[in-house]
Amino acid sequence: FFGAEAFVPLMLVEQRAVPLLQAGVVLTVGSIGWTVGSWLQARPWLRMRRDWLITLGCISVALGVGLVGLLAFLPTLPYVLVSAAWIFSGLGMGLATSSTSLAVMSLSDPTEQGRNASSLNVADALGSGIFVGIAGTIFAGLRSSGNLALTFGLLQLSMAVVGLLAVVTSRRIGIV
């Protein structure tokens, strides 16, 4: 998510000449999706296991980032479609992030909860940094081609592949 998010405003500004303020609004719209996902996963009437919520969140992130990648290859389409796609990414983060924290606590022995929660925080920060760095490396490698559709499209699609890998690995979570 964060590897893709770091380049959404740059893609809109450079490729589509969207004013910076409007490019930032696209990220704000995604945060609405995150809020809705966080709210949904906390509803008592939503009778879905945490491991399935995490998987559903990963699917939603991969879908949203993948759609942004496809839209990068179609720069003549309205940029508001990027905003709509980004809602799926935010929704997925809202579903998965809180659910992951709860799963860690639920699956941990009470004597290990503090250590495991700290490990999760470190892994979140490290993962964000690593994937923003990988996305930056992809950007730097492709930018010199001058083909912005290829640059941003492959960058976003590569981050969507990371999201699909998260879907696969999320299936290894125990029943929560």
Image (tube, rainbow, N blue to C red):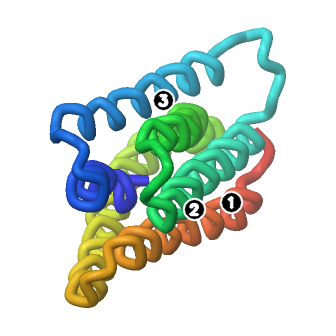
What amino acid type is highlighted by mark number 2? Gly
Q: Amino acid at mark 1?
A: Val
Q: Position of residue 135 (x, y in %)?
A: 33, 72
Q: Tags 3 and 1 in contact by the CB under 8 Å rule?
A: no
Q: Residue at x 44, y 53 (%)?
A: 1
Query: Which circle marks residue 34 in the picture?
Result: 3
Q: Which residue is mark 1?
A: 167
> In the image, residue 170 lies at what x, y percent?
68, 57
| Mark nearer the N terminus (2 vs 3) | 3
Judged from the image, the secondary structure of the residue bearing numbered disc 3 is helix
Q: Is residue 115 left or right of residue 68?
A: left
Residue at 23% from the left image edge and 51% from the top image edge: 17
Q: CA distance from mark 1 to mark 2?
A: 6 Å
The front one of 52 and 7 is 7
Residue at 45% from the left image edge and 23% from the top image edge: 32
Pointers 1 and 2 in contact (C-beta within 8 Å): yes
Residue 153: image location, x then y, percent = 45, 70
The quarter of the picture where the C terminus appears is top right
Q: Nearer the viewer, mark 3 or mark 1?
A: 3
Disc 2, disc 3: CB below 8 Å?
no
| Quarter holding residue 143 | bottom left
User: Of label 3 and label 1, which has the lower sequence position?
Assistant: 3
Residue count near mark 2 (Cα–Cα under 10 Å), binned few <14, some 14–19, many ≥20: many
Q: The residue under label 3 is which amino acid type?
A: Trp
The residue under label 2 is 163
Residue 167 as seen in the image, left or right of residue 154: right
Q: Considering only vertical position in the picture, is 125 above or below 53?
A: below
Count the numbered circles shown. Answer: 3
